Amino acid sequence: MSHDVTERRTESQGNASEASHVRFRATGFNPKANPIAAWGFFVVVIALWQLGSSTGFISELAMPSPVAVTKALWQLIITGDLWRHLGASLQRLVGGWIMGTVAGLLVGFLVGMFSWARSPGVAFVSALFPIPKIALLPLFIIWFGIGEPSKFATIAFGVFFPTVINTFGGVDNVQRNLIRMGQSFDLSMWSVTRKIILPGALPTILSGFRISSSIAIILLIAAEMIGAQYGIGALILAAGNLYQTDQLIAGVVVLSLLGLCVSWLLGRLDRWLLGWR
Amino acid sequence: MRLQIKGICHSYDQVEALRDIDFGIEPGEVVALIGPSGCGKSTLLSIIGGMLTPTKGEVLICDQATPDGCLNPLTYVFQDFALLPWRTVAGNISLVLEDHGLSKTDRDARVAEVLEQTNLWDFRDAYPKQLSGGMKQRVGIARALAVRPAVLLMDEPLSALDAQTRILLLDEFAALFARTGMTAVYVTHNLNEAVRLANRVVALRRRPGTIKEIHTIDIPLAERCDGMPELVAHERALWNLIRDEAIAADKELENVA
Ligand SMILES: Nc1ncnc2c1ncn2[C@@H]1O[C@H](COP(=O)(O)OP(=O)(O)OP(=O)(O)O)[C@@H](O)[C@H]1O
Ligand SMILES: [Mg+2]
């Protein structure tokens, strides 16, 4: 055998003049993360923005400079206005999200696990899911009044549907063989639910939290713009009415930071609950 | 525990999977189920363990004797291991002990005992994704042993593994069965596994699945080894038994696809 191989090798060396390299063909389609580029791009955009404002290329009224936005934000902080607005918003956001999530998890599990709940549940959710939930705010105002409850209800309602869909999908996606394994070892129904179905559905449920939290923020701002004294949405609307674009953009920046915080928190939750992945 | 399988017939909507299956499983005996793809081996094993209700017929427990501390008389070992990815090796084993009123100390003692038996002690805190296929199936075995089963029901436990690991685990199974005198039903495609492990081999015919022959191998498990001429002869005999069925199965699959 080895003799054979040697012989063949010598033969091919003999033809070395005609040999060419194998061309590498697997370039590209493999993007990699680069944190320096990420931050650098951010800095460059803000610098260009400031430059545009300073030279008058960007009108101060249409788009206040980063410096002006920072000043407006600082004003909001030292006057305490920011905390009043942010506090009101956070209460609605957290309260509404929790109500919608708890109800959604409950219904999602029922639909996922029980035949009697499945068809009615799926029909119900499919019919109501496509409604833009903000359209129901006037109805909720009639039911609950213009105050806080109608805002909670709008957010909760908006969060409820994606949570149901994700929970139900998560339960459905739990590997059947794991459930059968549990049953074959005579685990109780409750044990199978708690120790196999719940953890198995958790990744899908948690990824649903990302969707439902961003929906909650959208509904929060919309509801606050329709009728609220305090809240980031109210702040932005009022600033717009007064052409205080610096304050308006400051409010938007606060929203962006709020979104980042929520996503960071969910990331921590993921790592804590799904460490096994 | 002695099981008697009586007149089992099973049909899925259109497909008649099993017809008139009758045989017994004696205490301390390993019965292999062989037959071509789709002849109803898995269906039969599910029926034996109470995971599927047959269309007709019954599985009787003729003698209730179970090992000391038995928590789950009919216990499966799965082809795809069926381990919970969010539990460690030890956690996966203790899962099946948690619903039976054992104290934590008792549970831990049992987990430790089977971990030692299967040489998994050093892996007790690993998660399934960190383990090789062979290790995962050892966990599957350890989990099954932890409940001190009366009958082990194994559905192609080696077929998800690579050829080398399969040889290693086959030896371990043979040693385990020889040492413990475990009663088992062992479903396999692989005739070599059947002749290494089984006291009797039930060969099934397909569509509908019926018993073609029950082949007895009269060599004590402890005296068997790989490549032993008598076993090779048995393997040849089994192959002659199911060869035509296998060819038919192969052709039929082509037609269906
Ligand atoms: N849930 C099901 N619904 C309908 N038909 C099924 C179902 N499960 C199995 N069958 C059919 O019943 C027959 C027997 O299936 P079974 O899985 O028991 O065979 P098997 O001998 O275990 O096959 P394999 O060797 O491929 O594992 C097959 O023809 C299969 O297509
Ligand atoms: Mg099968």
Image (cartoon, helix red, strand yellow):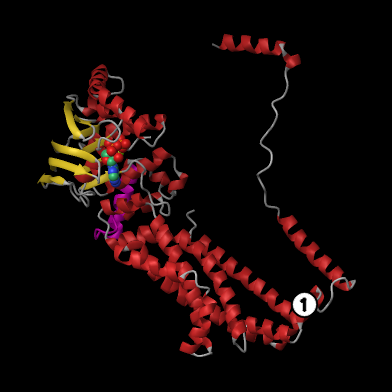
Q: Residue at x 42, y 45 (%)?
A: B123
Q: Position of residue B188 (x, y in %)?
A: 29, 33
Residue A11 vs B48, above or below: the answer is: above
**Span colored in magenta:** B96-116
Snapshot quadrant of residue B108? bottom left
> Would residue B115 be visible to someone looking at this image?
yes
Placement of the C terminus of chain B among the 4 image quadrants: top left
Asked if the magenta segment contains residue A121, the reply would be: no
Asked if the magenta segment contains residue B111, the reply would be: yes
Q: How many residues crowd mark 1 within 10 Å: few (<14), some (14–19), many (20+)?
A: many
* Nearer the observer, B205 or B217: B205
Q: Position of residue A129 (x, y in %)?
A: 47, 69
Judged left or right of residue B206, residue B161 is right
- Secondary structure mostly seen in magenta is helix
Q: Position of residue B38 (x, y in %)?
A: 29, 36
Judged left or right of residue A206, residue A218 is right
Judged left or right of residue B187, residue B136 is right
Snapshot quadrant of residue B233? top left
Q: Which residue is mark 1?
A: A69
Residue A248 vs A165, above or below: the answer is: below
Residue A276 vs A254, above or below: the answer is: above
Badge 1 element: helix
Q: Residue at x 35, y 31 (%)?
A: B255
* Nearer the observer, B7 or A121: A121
The image shows a total of numbered marks equal to 1
Chain letter of disc 1 in the image: A
Amino acid type at mark 1: Val
Q: Mark 1 CB in 8 Å range of ligand 1? A: no
Q: Residue at x 28, y 32 (%)?
A: B175
Quarter containing ligand 1?
A: top left
Residue A245 vs A172, above or below: the answer is: below
Q: Residue at x 54, y 66 (%)?
A: A211
